[in-house]
Amino acid sequence: MCENTKNIIEINDLEVNFKIKQGFYEEYIKRDKKIVRAVDKVNLNIGKGEIVSLVGESGSGKTSTGRALLQLTPISSGNIVFDGEEIKLNDKEYMKNFRKRAQMIFQDPYQSLNPRFTVFDIVTEPLLFTNSKARIAEKEVLALKALEFAGLRPAAEYLYRYPHELSGGQRQRVSIATCFIMSPDFIIADEPVSMLDASVRADILKLFVSMKEQQGTSFLFITHDLALAWLISNRVAIMYLGKIMESGPADLIADGCLHPYSQALTSVLAMVGEKKKTKRIVLKDETPSPLKVPKGCRFHTRCPVSRPYCSEVEPEYREINPGHFIYCHYPQKII
Amino acid sequence: MSEVLLEVQNLKTYFTITKGKVKAVDGVSFTLNKGESIGLVGESGCGKTTTALSVIRLLPKEGNVEGGKIIFEGNDITNLEEEKLSDFRWKEVSMIFQGAMNALNPVKRVCDQIAEPILLHEKISKTEAMKRVKELFELVELDTNLMYSYPHEFSGGMRQRAIIAMALACNPKLIIGDEPTTALDVMVQAQILDLINDLRKKLNMSMIMITHDLSIITETCDKVAIMYAGKIVELGETEEVVTNSLHPYTKMLISAFPNIYGERKMVDSIPGDPPDLYNPPEGCRFAQRCHMVNSKVCIPEESPPLIDYTGEGHFVACHLWRNSNV
């Protein structure tokens, strides 16, 4: 393990393509292969002990990016550097270690837990691979510690319950305990709180922050909620149609984003008990199909300030201020 | 404008299960004027959907209105028979259902589905009904060329628009929106909320908006009722309730939402779980989770009534308020 590398994950020009299944005629006679570019040349680094949020609408490729990072979806091109080393897919020992160090928390706590497993089974299942000779008593100690950390107290009471006996928030805590038991260095949390009530959401988020602070765990937090991203993360990246539109420090969201898309997103956020300071920019129409990505800048069809040049030349993903990257020809304040 | 359209008085809706009765809604009262919109907010399981289903009388067979009255335009509809109800539903009150993805029939064309309530309720021919569907499509800003499509050809936002068109099909006076934007993306959500606001102004409709997201209420509703464990704990003008909340639960709920224009600090959560409504606790139902609880007053006394302490139409159900004012 290289201790001197600063980033836990470096994504370089990552592409994830999905082939569309078509009929015999299109496929073999016309040879017209259709490909969806779910993730199109994404560059992103995640530092050690950092929470980076990936924000975007559904279909923007944020989940595909997350899954590709863990090699749950094959990547089409580009590479991923994990802790100073490129991921070696063919090296079994390496992958075993990698799987131990990088974990994922899924969105829906109602579907991600096996209903026939007790909480103990769920939480200690990963140990089968890493510590298969452990005795039940040993596992129990570990499971109790993990559950205790995840905020299920007293943990002993939950150990032999089934998922259906738990509420949504408690289930998500079980998922977190399952992650925690491996003490991973990197966690991908895919919309971990979108199914939960506002009143329990905060506790789950606090768990992530305390994991980061206590153990230096790094997070990729995938969400559609800009306000949450702003709240917990160090850096934020906003995705649209498979590309990162803008990325930079989380404070950008409150004030300082320059891409028209990010500005539109922040302008429609409704804040409780806050008079609107700015006018709302409601974008017309819907996100174009990823099968037909618009020519030039892929946002120009919906951009409120697009110019003729935008529809011809694709902008580069460039750094305009230190740490602030943008995919736009004419970054400007439009609110 | 201040004509009363709907009056719910002390509504009690219970679900019968093998063990006994679950008091899903227990003594809810509110009034709704013509052209006004009210938001029902609360955690899951607090009875907000049950309240709305009681109004449109669409409760599942285990659910019964066991007490209280629902008065719509001066008529008591609490015990209306099933035949008369079909006149009332959709023509007077209609509903926008949660989860636009599942609310449409996948094997019927969208236009046929929207025409269905029109043909059922009004004695007009199919061509006339289709003309009306076309108008509705224009009203909700959908492309009329897509009228004859099937639901799977629509995106989430378009389906939600189609469902709104369906709810408007018979010119109802009251629309109930049950989490109409929950499954949608931020930008589509903004579009749909704008559409709902415009339509409400254009057609002078009243609305009951059910959601767990307080920020949606601040965008769409004149009044808001905060519900907890089957009871309304705070009721008043949205602006007033949000900026000057009186009940500890409302305060905690508001602080659970981050505000990107304010200071960046971690949001708070509400410790504990909502009570089991099969056997609700004595006294104030929020007492177990309340950080301001006074064990001498809140738990031994019976559950606090909803009272307007300020005299300005801002109601709150909390013992602490009564004691501080008396």
Image (tube, coloured by chain):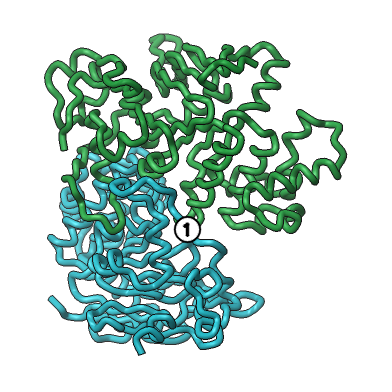
Chain colours: A green, B cyan
Is residue B89 depicted above or below B78 in this figure? Answer: above
Look at the image and tell me whether residue A117 can be seen: no
CA neighbours of label 1 inside 10 A, class few (<14), some (14 to 19), many (20+): many
Q: Amino acid at mark 1?
A: Ser
Which residue does the image show at 24% across and 40% down from the upper left?
B146
Q: Is residue A134 left or right of residue B188?
A: right
Is residue A16 depicted above or below A201 in this figure? Answer: above
Write down the chain letter for disc 1: A
User: A281 and A242: which one is in front?
Assistant: A281
In the rendered image, residue A81, in percent from the top left (x then y), is placed at 54, 15
Q: Quadrant of residue A239?
A: top left
Q: Is residue B201 left or right of residue A210?
A: left
Q: Is residue A23 left or right of residue B221?
A: right
Which residue does the image show at 42% across and 79% down from the upper left?
B318
Element type at marker 1? helix
Residue identified by numbered label 1 = A199
Is residue B316 depicted above or below A131 in this figure? Answer: below
Is residue A203 depicted above or below B40 in this figure? Answer: above
Q: Quadrant of residue A313?
A: top left
Which residue does the image show at 62% across and 43% down from the upper left?
A175
User: A209 and A314: which one is in front?
Assistant: A209
In the rendered image, residue B134, in percent from the top left (x then y), is placed at 18, 50
Q: Quadrant of residue B128?
A: bottom left
Q: Quadrant of the N terminus of chain A?
A: top right
